[in-house]
Each structure stands twice: as C-alpha cells, then as structure tokens.
Image (cartoon, grey):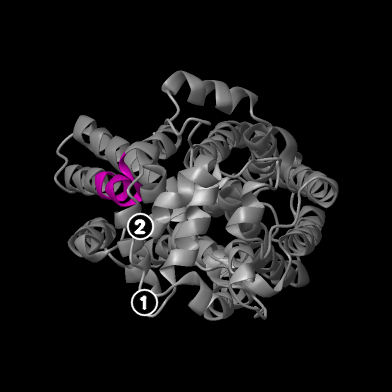
Amino acid sequence: MMMIGTLLGGFVTEQFGCLQCLRISLLLEMAGWASIFWAKNFTELMVGRVLTGFGSGLGTPAAYLILTDVSLIRFRGMMATLNSFSNNFAWLIGLVIGKYCPLNVVILTYAMSPALFLILSPFLPESAVWLTKKGLEKEAVKALRCVRGPDYPVQVEMKELMHCVGSSDSNGNRKSLVKKMKYYFTAKQFITPLGIMLFLSVVQGSCGCDTISFYSLKIFRLARVSLDAYVMAILLQLGYTAGYLLIAPVMEKINRKHLFITACGMMTVALSILASNMPNADDIVIEDAVPPPVYVQMILPIAIFMFSVSYGAGMGPAIYTWSSELFPPRDRNVGCSLTLSVRHIVVALVLKVYPWMLRSFGLAHLFSAHGVVLIIGICFVFFIVPETRGLTLTQLTTLFGGKLADERIITSADKYDCNAAATDTSSESTSLTSEEPKETKGTKESASLIPFIV
C-alpha cells in the first residue's frame, strides 16, 4: 500500500498542495494506528496496516517537495537529507522501544508525531512554488514572507518563480489534462530526468540497504554473530541515522556526484568484507555449526556499520536530493512521486524473493550481487547524471531543455507590494540566496539577478 500511496501522492500534491496532502496522509496514519491499537481480530489489524502504509506513502513526496520548495539554494540538499534522517531516526526509535517496551507503547509513540503535525500545520506556509503554479501569486508572496522574513526582497524571487513555474501555453491559458498527459509522455525535459531517476531508484532498491534492514534479524542469526541479533539491527539503523546527520551540515559543500560515487565505493568495500566472511548456502542449514572465529565476529559489525553510515552519508542523500532537483519545478510533483513509487516497487519485489535467495544462494553471494549493483550505479552516475549542487531554479528549469514562461505571463508579479524593489535590494537578495555574493551595478543588472534566487 505504501507504493500505491507514493504513486498517488504526487498527483494529490499537484491538485491540493503539499500541506493539504500531508494532512490527509497523517490523518490516514492516525486512523491506521488507532485501528491497530484497538484491533480485536486479524481483519481490523490488516485495515490498520493498510491505512498506515497508504498514508505514509501518500505524504512521502509532499514532505520532500515542500522542503525543497521553501529552501534557499545553500540549504536545499541539507533539508532533503534531514527529512530522510527523520525517517531513519523514527525507525531507530521503534527498534529501541520495541526491544524494551510493550507493543502498545510503540503504537502510541508512532501516533504522536502525526497528531503533533496536525496541530501545528495551520501555522505552516504552503509551498510558494505550488501557489504560483495555481495562479495564487498573492498567497505565494505571503508564504515567502513567512519563510524568508519581513526584510527579504520577495519581489525578485517571485519574478523567478513566475519565469520557471508558469505552466501556461503561448496564450496564457492553463494546460488541459490531455495536454499534460501528452507532455509527460513526450517532453524531453521530463522524460530525461524521469529515466535517470527510475534507473537510480532500481539501483537504490536493489543495493541491499532495505533488504538488510528488513531481514537484519534473520541475516545476523544466520551469520552466527555472537552479538545479539537485535543489537546488530539497532547498530545498522544507528549507522543510517548517523550518516544522514553527519552529512547534512556539509551537504552543499560537496558535489552530489562525488558524494554518491564515494559512498557507493565504501558500501561496495563493506559488502565485499561481509561476502567474504558470511556462510554459504550449504552452511545455513547447519543449526549447530561452530560460530565463526573471533576476528570475523569483530569485523562483521564494523562492516555493517560502515555500510549503513556510507549509505546514510552519501547514497541516500544524493538520490533523495536529485529526486526533487532534476525535474523542472512545474513537473516536480509528478516526477518525484513516480520515482519514489518505483523504488518502493523494486524493494517490495526484492523482499518477496529474498527468503528464497537466502536459501538458494546464501548470504555471501547475495552481498556480492548487491556490490555489483553498486558498481553499475557508480558508472551510471559518473557518465550520465549531471551535477546539480548550487544550481538555481532557473538553471534547474532549463537543465534538460526546459523553457521559461513567456515574459508577459509574469508581469502580474509586479502588482504585489513586496516591501522592496528589485533594483534597491538585488545585492542583498543575492547575498541571502546564492552561495557567493555578486556585485551589481544599477537597475540594468537587476533582471540578471533573478537566476540567483531560491
């Protein structure tokens, strides 16, 4: 159900906005947790699982999108990373609480965060990108002021939003559903990043991070590590969480491609260590087998932690950031939901066949296969994926041949009082939003500053 929710999440966000989609998804999650908490039979329990899975998937694209939309250039990667960090941190909390507390405490803990967001959501601004797409420029200005502060030159940013997000034809009319569907199937600026992200989603779903997480208890028991299998599972999630947390502050100082390639290389080394010290398929059936040597029992936890930290500090942040950067702003909702849903589909398929693969091939061969997938991903990113660090909204829009909106469509942005004219505040605007301040000379250069906003 999570993959179905993720697939629909982009279309719901496109229609109703990020905040409204998050509210709907979290209401479904709360209803699901309530059904699980008071379940008296298997049917009620499954209803709760369906609601929580569908709700979680429905809100996944909206969470990434709204953080990307409200972020300045230098904070865009950090926000996407912190969003992924929060997911892994919640998983880690669930493992710790699940080990020492009854199930009802776990359920109540997970139900608290949706309730807290729903209480605070009326005070949160909607995405200015979505508001601009819907022609609500006045509301978009208010949202920008709420996020940027009263002294921020909103007018300049609004002009770039109108340039990049305007989904109108040459006559200024909004696209019909038929034209939108034709656009999604034929437009190079949408098909190209979609193909890139679909391939990366397959690599991410089959690199071993999710399968090792879901089957961590079984894997560690089969490996006959002297440490408690539950402790090893917690160590794995701790590595993911620590990786996201460590890379977040420096995310905008490292190229996305370098980050991905370095992390995948370290993950491949860790998988090689695991593969060389894991039992084969014939060894798995021997329940009274002698435990591995002491040095193997020491190196396995280190390799597991190295794998998870590398994923959290590199591969995960790069892919999740790309999912909201490679697509043009006007197509970001649909593109992000499609790529995230494909990732869930790949993970679901791998999880279904993983028990059979464990019995047939053994852990060593499975970890070797994951390493091969990572090497393929490294080659793909090196030769195909463009670098997006520091690119402005205008540059992201035209990255794959996208066009900016007609100049006459954006004149409405000048109708709103934004507390500062672009000619008076362009220098301040650039220093607030770009990575390096740029000098300006009068009003003739104010228009050229538009690409440095957002």
Horizontal side of 11 relative to 292 (left or right) equals left
Magenta span: helix, strand or loop, mainly? helix
Q: Residue at x 18, y 34 (%)?
A: 41
Residue nearest the observer in this picture, 303 or 447: 447
Is-magenta flag for residue 23?
yes
x, y (%) of residue 386? 76, 51
Question: Disc 1 on helix, strand or loop?
Answer: loop
Residue nearest the observer in this picture, 378 or 286: 378
Give the mark nearer the N terminus: 2 vs 1.
1
Is-magenta flag for residue 7?
no
Bounds of the magenta segment? 16-24
Q: Residue at x 58, y 48 (%)?
A: 323
x, y (%) of residue 31? 19, 44
Quadrant that contains the N terminus: top left
x, y (%) of residue 119? 18, 62
Residue nearest the observer in this picture, 300 or 4: 4
x, y (%) of residue 445? 64, 69
- Alpha-carbon neighbours of circle 2 within 10 Å: few (<14), some, or many (≥20)? few
The amino acid marked with disc number 1 is Gly
In whole angstroms, how far apart are the C-alphas of marks 2 and 1? Answer: 20 Å
Q: Residue at x 30, y 41 (%)?
A: 16
The amino acid marked with disc number 2 is Lys
Horizontal side of 22 relative to 271 (left or right) equals left
Q: As displayed, is residue 388 above or below residue 438? A: above
Q: Kindly identify which numbered label has been placed on residue 149.
A: 1
Asked if labels 1 and 2 touch by Cβ distance under 8 angstroms, the answer is no
Which residue is the site of mark 2? 415
